[in-house]
Amino acid sequence: MTGFSRRKKELDEEIEAHRRMAIADRIARGESEAQARAAAEREMGNLPLVKDVTREKWGWAWIERLGQDLRYAMRQMRRSPGFAATAIGTLALGIGAAAAMFTVVDHALLRPLPYKDAARLVTLQETGPGPNNAWSAPWLDIAQWRAQSRSFVDIAFSSGMRGRTYIQGNSAALQVDGQQVSPNLFAMLGANAALGRGFIAEQPNFGTGKNAGGIVLSNAAWRDAFGGDKNIIGRVVRVNDEPWTVIGVMPPGFRYSPSFRGAPVGPEVWVAVHLGENDTGRDYKSDHYDVIARLRPGVKIEAARAEMATIQKQVAAQYEDPEERADHSLIDVKGYADSLIDGDVKKALLALLAASGVLWLIASVNVTNLLLARSMARRREIAMRGALGASRGRVMQQMIVEGLVISGCAAVLGVGLALGAINLTKSVAPINLNVNFSTHLDLTILAALCGLTLLSAVLSSAWPALMAVRAPIEPALKQGGQQAGSGRRHNRLRSGLVAIEVAMSLTLLVACGLLLRTIYTLRHVPLGYRTDHIVVANLSIPSYRYVNKSVNASLYQPLLERAQHLHGVQAAGLISEVPLGKTFNILLTLRMNGNDISAALKTATPDVQKIFGMKMLAGRFFSNDDTPTSQGVAVVNPAFAAEYAPNKHDPSSLLGMTVWNLRQGMPAHIVGVLDNERQKTVAEPSQPEIEICLCQITPESGIYQPSTIAMDLAVRTEQPPSQMIPDLRDLLRQASPELANSRFSTMDQIVEDSFGSQRLAAHLLEVFGGAALLLCVAGLYGLLAYVVSQRTRELGVRIALGARRRNLLWLVMRQAGAMLLVGVVAGLGLALASGRLVRGFLYGVKAHDAWTLAAAALLLFASGLLAAYLPARRAARVNPMEALRAE
Amino acid sequence: MKPEQDKYRNRIDLLQGTLDMLILQSLQWGPQHGYAISQALRARSGEVLQVETGSLYPALHRMERQKWIAAEWRQTEQNQRARFYKITAEGRRQLAANRSRWNTMVAAIASILEA
């Protein structure tokens, strides 16, 4: 601003020179000096105004004014630090909550995928009528789509590598996410290798030999396994002990895994898919692929859907099995980005974003109320400015700048709050929620934040400013003192704002209450097993090492032996997936007694019953007498019995029936029925399930391979489970180095994690609801305290005239009660209307649950009255002498 | 009192473009400071046009920003430091354009009045 002040001085000098010359001229013409001075000054007029108008021509007057306003706003804030702190704190809370939620939503839902023109990418999945699963597709179907469809530039596909994938690095084996992809995939995604040529976008075929296509590494795999070796291209590396030639390294940031928005993606490798004999048919033996396609420019997704529906009719006709034909009769064309996020989580996040928006609104309303109160107190100052000629626009601008300064400070504080909140959430959010909580602030977030801040400023200060400048000047000046009967309209307005706050807070409180009840109900659902003192390790097994040798003999048996002898361990067992584990899933379809049976398949060791304390409805669980050579055994659950038992009311009628061939010539007999168990979620009843004894699975068995991929080690401990984890990890490392990467948890934690989105929503709503309650109480208190201070004189007169103090207390409380009542009634309406938003997350409680509504309303009402009591008591204690003398 | 009032009645409110034109014209005769410009305009208009400081300086500073005129500090003959303005090439072009517009307008108005 030095340039500006220099020019200002120059202008002063220029005008002064003009004045001197004018005076000198007049003196030269014979006027006296005094006469000349007076005449010249009269002629030149209002000099400060002349300078003002001239300065405006420089084109930066607005900067000067802004500077004035800023300085003025700072002065105002220094003069009333309490007010400033309250306003800034309140807004910071609102902005912080909204910014934090937006950051999470942005990362989870809005951020475009790291592919070229990602919005044009779609997935193709075959489905059947009814609420069916979506299926991946065999090669023959994909080939037919490719040949017949016109909607797509290209169609690519991929499937995960079998089992767990390990790449042998320079020093150690690294577990990676491995995908076999069609060679055109990366070109379709618009991604080129950073090193090497990558895949050549050709059609896959049956001709080339296995492993011929080579392997492409992700940047992370290249760095972690090979130390970023620049000469990696052409080197032969071993993946699951098979040799592959490295043909490319992708740039950092590139990832492709059909579920990569899940837990943060680690290192990845990709190999070209090799079509073989599993790709010549359309049945359960065929390989199935995840299909991704790019829409042709100008083609809408609806058009693609219509075209594919026609093609799929012909494709489905070629399925031989009638049931399979029905299951593949329809096709689902979906935006690729949408397919990556779980619908439940998406709904939860959007609902929470709405909740944080409500909190922000409450904060803005609160600050509006504060500013309104202050503009009333400053009525005289504003009127004075008006009388001195300040235009309304100018006064408004100044007040809005004040609002901007407040919101600006609040935004800075809010960002801090948001970052803190996200970090905090990250640690409590369940891992299986598949949301990437990143605290990375980027341009989108900053832009959104600026928008929020500006909006907050305009919302909270423009209106009070308008109210202030609209007020007629004269009465304000005439009545002068603070005690002037402030406009009744104004108070009604402010009461209305408080009522709105109350209503919105109630909505948040009700939602919070409903979710807390949901969590409470979920925690009290009888699970059918114990969850305390159990450590669970989801083993990361190097499957490839056990392809043709018994994993039982070489890994599981020794592991169990040693685990059982570990100090503090009561029992150790293996089960392919602990209840609620959400790690692995085998669905078995078979025929039993002429019935089609569909059931989940699990394997377990005998000790699992002891560890989980499972009870039997009938028969027995596995025992140590069950061996690879003894009779095949299986245990089923009540859901299985209810569905398939010959006598539906007697589970024991199943005992002795054979369900499945463990291997050629070895049928499994049902020997027991478990008491109930919740498998997938606490909220849903179990599906039919068959469990077989792990020791009876041999390499010849049909499910041998799955048993080398998915296995959970469950250990019942005497001490708190978390203390056992280091010892167990050591034990696993000794068994095989790869196992040290196994994921440890406790059964209690797994149950908690299974509440997923409900738990996250409940936690966040606790925060939002609590903050809303606080703001609302503060708003109410602020308004009443202000009203009482404005009415001190009136109250004094009332007392002097004989009013009782009780009456005065009642006077204020009545006003508070009216605001609260209006707010609560409106809030109940809002809560009922917004019940639709939360209904999907509730369990065991209805969205319009009367108890929750009543409790939330009561809580709000009680805290509101408490907040009102303080100013009311002050009103009742007014000393009439002092109140009247103060004037 | 009488002459004051007359003067007031005879004064013509100058349109913005007109004032610009008159200032540029008076600078045609050489660089001048603000006071001299106002005196020159008054003298040449036979005391009819009196440019107020509140119009003159904003106009000068605006035209300076538009680069029609340039300014520098100099001493007057009476040894007073003053800000002198001089017309630029751009200003001359502007003046010519203003003049031809003015002439057209005067001719048009005249033909209406004489019709």
Image (cartoon, grey):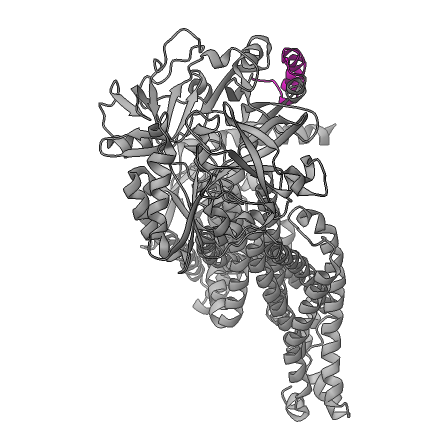
Of the pair A647 and A573, the residue shown nearer to us: A647
Residue A28 in the image: above or below residue A652: below
Residue A147 x/y as whole percent: 56, 8
* Residue at point 32%, 37% (across, down): A738
Q: Quadrant of residue B81?
A: bottom left
Residue A118 in the image: above or below residue B41: above
Q: Which residues are magenta?
A: A297-321
Q: How many marks?
A: 0
Of the pair A616 and A188, the residue shown nearer to us: A616
Of the pair A262 and A63, the residue shown nearer to us: A262
Q: Quadrant of the C terminus of chain A?
A: bottom right
Q: Is residue A528 left or right of residue A739?
A: right
Would residue A762 be visible to someone looking at this image? yes
Q: Is residue B29 left or right of residue A770?
A: left
Q: Main secondary structure of the magenta part?
A: helix
Would residue A9 be visible to someone looking at this image? no
Residue A663 in the image: above or below residue A564: above
Query: Is residue A318 shown in magenta?
Result: yes
Q: Is residue A742 left or right of residue A304?
A: left
Residue A513 x/y as whole percent: 65, 59
Q: Quadrant of residue B89?
A: top left
Residue A229 x/y as whole percent: 23, 28
Q: Is residue A815 left or right of residue A219?
A: right
* Residue at point 53%, 51% (across, down): A751
Q: Residue furthest top?
A: A207
Query: Is residue A706 shown in magenta?
Result: no
Residue B66 x/y as whole percent: 45, 38
